[in-house]
Image (spheres, rainbow, N blue to C red):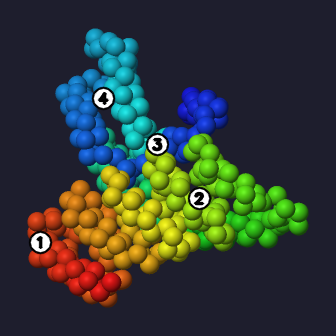
Amino acid sequence: GIIYAAASAAAILILSKSVTGGEELKHMLVGDVLLVSLSTVANMALLYGTIGLFHVIFRKKFLAISLDPEGAEASGINIRLWDILFYMSFGVVITKSVAIVGVLLVFSYLVVPAVIAQMWRETVRGRLLLGWLVAILASTAGIVWSFYSDYPTGPAVVVMLGIFLVFSSITYYILHAPVRLRAVVNVTAMVLFGAAVMGGLAHFKKKEPATAAAKVAPIDLLLNEIAGNEESRQLDGVTHLGDMHDSRIVPALNNLLARTKSEQVVEATVEALSKQKDPRAIPALRHAAEADYDPFLKLSIARAQLATGDREGYATLIKILRNDEAGFARNQAIELLESKSGQKFGYDPGQTVAQNAAALRRIEEWWARERSRK
């Protein structure tokens, strides 16, 4: 825990000197689970499988030095050697995982499933199986929640693991209490006390001074931020400009969308243009829709196209539906297409593109009719 805190603080200090330190820090903490490429997943599966096989082959030695180090040493096992091998292999897994899903998720996976499993199981096998089950269920629930609520996936999974831990702890406490009714009363009292404390803190929240509004950056300053080349400033400017109204905003956002190389800036700019609902953004969005972005970013572009009144957004959605690697993006693409068109095409995102051939023909025929009405 001490090393974890010190290392995280050191990383924050280093990133604070980076131009895009805020975004790099966010990536370090929560990662980009949904943006991981298939090749990265395959490489990680091969690496983790190899390390897992190594641990299975030498599981008796690892269990011996963990559960009975004195007995292991008496039997002739070199404890230091096997400790080093364990922590080296463990370190490789941690380092590679952090680069993909971030520190918070890795730390949560290490601790939460193990704590829950230790509550309910006594054997190593039982704890392993229950820990894996908890991790799978919490991960699935977190991903589904983030998908439908548009939250970052990593933090959503961490929160879901926390919820699992809270409910597991409460259930364990009640079931193992000498008097269960009293345990239920204690839990209820704790919940009410926590709610009262949070309500009190919200009630006594310090109000913003009347002069705070004067400190808000004027639109000229925000336009200057997105005109520069610093990614962190661009993201800050785009976030604020999306909710403002000025004739200069859309041309500035169009210019940024055309020249940026950062997908994070592209996504933020597309969202801002979607809020503006200005037809002047149509050419820039059409150009962005032709770029080689991931399916979820293309989905955001399609939404923005439709929000600005450009029906070519339907063509962007159809491209997503024709992409077998689009995954969950196809679910949202067909939902958006059917809600906007008012029709059901029979497209099943759970099937392959080939299996959806008939539905795609119906979609293409509908789009051909719609496009000819221009």
Amino acid type at circle 3 is Gly
In the drawing, does residue 22 fall left or right of residue 150? right
Give the CA distance from mark 2 to mark 3: 33 Å
Dot placed on the residue nearer the N-terminal end, 4 or 1: 4
Residue in the image at 22% along x and 80% along y: 368
Task: Determine which of the numbered discs, if any, sits on residue 252 in the image.
Answer: 2
Disc 4 secondary structure class: helix
Please report contact status of discs 2 and 4: CB closer than 8 Å, yes or no: no
Give the CA distance from mark 2 to mark 4: 62 Å
Q: Quadrant of the C terminus?
A: bottom left
Q: Please name which of the two marks, 2 or 4, marks the residue nearer to the observer.
A: 2
Q: Which residue is mark 4?
A: 63
Give the CA distance from mark 3 to mark 1: 38 Å
| Quadrant of the rendered image containing residue 70 | top left
Q: Please name which of the two marks, 3 or 4, marks the residue nearer to the observer.
A: 3
In the drawing, does residue 217 fall left or right of residue 22? right
Q: Is residue 112 above or below residue 290?
A: above
Q: Residues within 10 Å of mark 1 (few under 14, many from 20)?
A: few
Residue in the image at 57% along x and 65% along y: 250
Q: Which residue is mark 3?
A: 102
